[in-house]
């Protein structure tokens, strides 16, 4: 069943006195518990689309539906995680994770117990009282993802969350992310430049170029090296 849908999304920005079209009629459906990756070159509109889906900004044309309700321009309904972790440096890990529920005005005592139970799921059970500067890059991203999850949405929008990590840490967190998404029954849209990462994690890959989706590729057998190599070639040709 479709949980998130973008219909005919257009977006332009003013650049040097002229309107520059960034998105040119994007249509996208995300099903429950589906993992979609969006790949494309810098400037093709990937991050802009996530901002529109999250309600941070408004499209020039088109609408966005979440759980069959129109949510165009309504922020705070979906979990959105930008590339930088944006943890508050003066707050401990658990307090950073609880920020969304404080903003939403939920019962902090109930939510704190919930967050504490989630710490092992995110590999943070030993770091609840650490400040961000005491955490490695990988742990900071785990904390940021846990904070995003605490929005309560079953849809998470992830904008290159692993891009700033070293290769070894990134590979390990890719495995961990796939496991967490499965265990928590989440639906994900991931923006990434890394084609291998997209293949490793996704049920479907949408290739974006010039503000449009130019290819949609289902990933059906990521355990087959030849199959993955074939898909990678298809994506590279589309780009």
Image: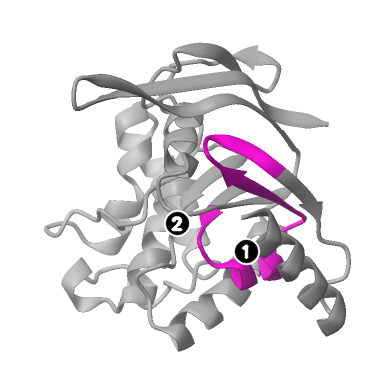
| Residue at image mark 1 | 180
Tell me which corner region of the image, top left, top right, bottom left or bottom right, holds residue 236.
bottom right
Tell me which corner region of the image, top left, top right, bottom left or bottom right, holds residue 94.
bottom left
Q: Residues within 10 Å of mark 2 (few under 14, many from 20)?
A: many
Say if 171 sits above or below 50 in the image.
below
Which range of residues does the magenta coloring cover?
191-214
Q: Report x, y in % for residue 142.
A: 43, 66
Say if 175 sits above or below 7 in the image.
below
Q: Between 140 and 160, which is closer to the camera in this rendering?
A: 160
The residue shown at (56%, 21%) is 9
Q: Considering the numbered disc 2 on the image, is that residue within a helix, a strand or a loop?
A: helix
The N terminus: image quadrant: top right
| Residue at image mark 2 | 145
Left or right, 34 with respect to 161, comes to: right
Left or right, 235 with respect to 90, comes to: right
Q: Earlier in the sequence, mark 1 or mark 2?
A: 2
Q: Report x, y in % for residue 200.
A: 69, 71
Q: Between 61 and 239, which is closer to the camera in this rendering?
A: 239
Say if 53 sits above or below 138 in the image.
above
Q: CA distance from mark 1 to mark 2?
A: 10 Å
């Amino acid at each position: 069943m479709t949980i998130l849908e973008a219909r005919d999304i257009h977006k332009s920005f003013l650049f040097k006195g002229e309107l520059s079209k960034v998105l040119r009629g994007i249509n996208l459906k995300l099903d429950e518990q589906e993992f979609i990756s969006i790949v494309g070159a810098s400037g093709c509109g990937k991050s802009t689309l996530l901002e529109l889906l999250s309600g941070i900004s408004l499209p020039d044309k088109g609408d966005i539906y979440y759980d069959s309700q129109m949510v165009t321009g309504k922020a705070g309904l979906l979990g959105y995680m930008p590339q930088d972790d944006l943890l508050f440096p003066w707050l401990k890990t658990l307090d950073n994770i609880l920020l969304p529920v404080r903003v939403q005005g939920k019962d902090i005592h109930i939510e704190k117990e919930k967050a504490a139970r989630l710490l092992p799921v995110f590999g943070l059970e030993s770091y609840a009282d650490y400040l961000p500067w005491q955490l490695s890059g990988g742990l900071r991203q785990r904390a940021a993802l846990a904070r995003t999850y605490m929005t309560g949405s079953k849809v998470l929008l992830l904008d290159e969350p692993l891009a700033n990590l070293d290769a070894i840490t990134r590979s390990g967190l890719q495995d961990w992310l796939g496991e967490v998404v499965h265990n928590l029954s989440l639906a994900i849209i991931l923006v990434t430049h890394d084609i291998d990462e997209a293949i490793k994690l996704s049920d479907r890959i949408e290739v974006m170029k010039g503000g449009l989706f130019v290819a949609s590729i289902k990933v059906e057998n990521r355990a087959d090296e030849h199959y993955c190599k074939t898909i990678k070639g298809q994506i590279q040709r589309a780009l």
